[in-house]
Amino acid sequence: MQETFRLIIWDLLDIEGGFANRSRKADPGGPTNLGITQRTLQAWRGRPVSVEEVENLGREEALQIYRVQYWDAVKGDDLPRGLDFTLFDCAVNSGPARAVKILQKILKVKVDGVLGLITLGAVKAQAVTYLINEFSARRLQFMKRLKNWPYNKNGWTRRVRHVQERSLELVDNAMMKRAPMPILEPHQNEEGAKAVEEETSAFSAWMTPDGVTKGAVALSGFSGILAGSGPVQWGFAIVLVVSVCVGGWLLIKKERAT
């Protein structure tokens, strides 16, 4: 399976682009080069690194980081060909744990973000093309809940579709042509922006089916109470408002945890 890593890494680097330092609203990853953020590089080197060091990051070191921190983290060598690229790209963009959790939800196994023997066994019981297509759809759903979705929606949509198509090509044993290392110029690359779960917005949480249902029930009950008059009705109204606020907070907390 290591052959797959060599094939897709150039494709990934082309998606991620060169050095970029966009606003935190657009890209919470901060200063990034070859898809490696300043925080990731600091963890890899075990010391603080400057923005200049990120900008001067070499390709060989970047490839080592991708192999150890992302490919190995999602057990790329143990996954079926095609699905390995799908998970790997998501791991780079949103973190290995998020990538594994999306897969585990599809497989209906324990969602702990760790790709172990049970998850691998469940993978073998499913058609690879189904897993790639379903994973791509759910990954895009996750991205749409993030605060920086409006800044990156076009790039992320292209990225997910591109990875989906390439992954299906791998399944069909269509060898991805190994392209020369792309010329990476500084640019505002939407596709390379990090899509991390910490950026889930409160508004997006309320826009989930669970949130919409809770909101509708609350409004219905509140309007019914206001139809009456007197201290009892107003007392119920106050209790309902407090309950909705607490429920909303728990809903947002739940969305950020999943």
Image (cartoon, rainbow, N blue to C red):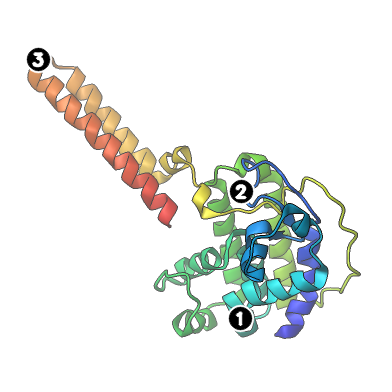
Query: In this view of the protein, which residue sits in the foreground, 174 or 241?
Result: 241
**Relative to 87, is 214 above or below?**
above
Residue 77 location (% of width, % of height): 64, 84
Q: Position of residue 193 (x, y in %)?
A: 68, 51
Q: Is residue 177 left or right of residue 231?
A: right
- Marker disc for residue 230: 3
Label 3 secondary element: loop
Q: Mark 2 or 3, which is nearer the eye?
A: 2
Looking at the rendered image, the quarter that the N terminus falls into is: bottom right
Give the secondary structure at mark 1.
Answer: loop
The answer to whether residue 172 is seen in the rendering is no
Please say whether residue 184 is visible from this viewpoint. Answer: yes
Q: Quadrant of the C terminus?
A: bottom left
Query: Residue 71 has which mark?
Result: none
- Residue at x-position 42% and y-position 69%: 111
Q: Which one is closest to the eye, mark 1 or mark 2?
A: 2
Quarter of image, res 207:
top left
Residue 161: % across, % down? 70, 57
Label 1 sits on what residue type? Answer: Leu
Where does residue 91 sit, x and y in percent of width and height?
Answer: 61, 66
